[in-house]
Amino acid sequence: MSDQPPYVPDWHDVISYSKPGPTPHLLVDEPELRVLVAGLEPGGRIPPHPERRAVYTALDGEGFLFLDGVALPFREGAIVVVPDGSTRGIEAVTRLSFMAVRIGPDPVATD
């Protein structure tokens, strides 16, 4: 394992688009920090689920991020900070790419 931090000069080079769910590209996968980029084809989705605190950033495309049942427009430039334990999901309207940064212990691993 390299001591160099992950560096991606262009996220387009590592993103994969899929349907019905994403195929994430992990940049960091540690017990208290997970950073990934992922893509969804139109109509693709991540079903609502509880998860640790996270920050989601839409890189390209349009869709919705569902936070505790509320549909938030999720398109290029949108940033959503999600509290620990909140239910979240994503649905793509167009081809959608995003980055997720999950912070803190994985709730599944600590139950």
Image (spheres, helix red, strand yellow):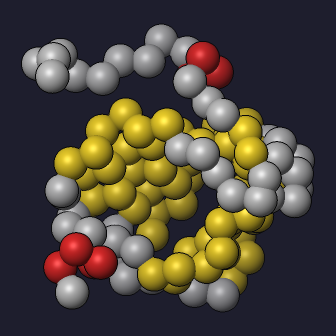
Q: Quadrant of residue 14?
A: top right
Residue 2 locus on image (x, y percent):
15, 17
Residue 20 visible from this viewpoint:
yes
Q: Quadrant of residue 105?
A: bottom left
Left/right of residue 72 with respect to residue 8 in the rendered view:
right
Q: Is residue 28 depicted above or below 51 in this figure?
A: above
Q: Is residue 2 depicted above or below 24 in this figure?
A: above
- The total number of labels drawn is 0
Left/right of residue 57 with respect to residue 16 in the rendered view:
left
Residue at horizontal 40 percent and vertical 74 percent from the top = 51
Residue in the foreground of this view, choosing between 104 and 47: 47
Residue 108 locus on image (x, y percent):
29, 78
Residue at horizontal 37 percent and vertical 83 percent from the top = 85
Left/right of residue 88 with respect to residue 84 in the rendered view:
right
Residue at horizontal 39 percent and vertical 61 percent from the top = 54
Q: Quadrant of residue 107?
A: bottom left
Residue 36 locus on image (x, y percent):
45, 42
Residue at horizontal 18 percent and vertical 56 percent from the top = 31
Tell me the quadrant of the picture where the C terminus can be found: bottom left
Residue 87 locus on image (x, y percent):
52, 82
Q: Is residue 43 depicted above or below 51 in this figure?
A: above
Residue 99 visible from this viewpoint:
no
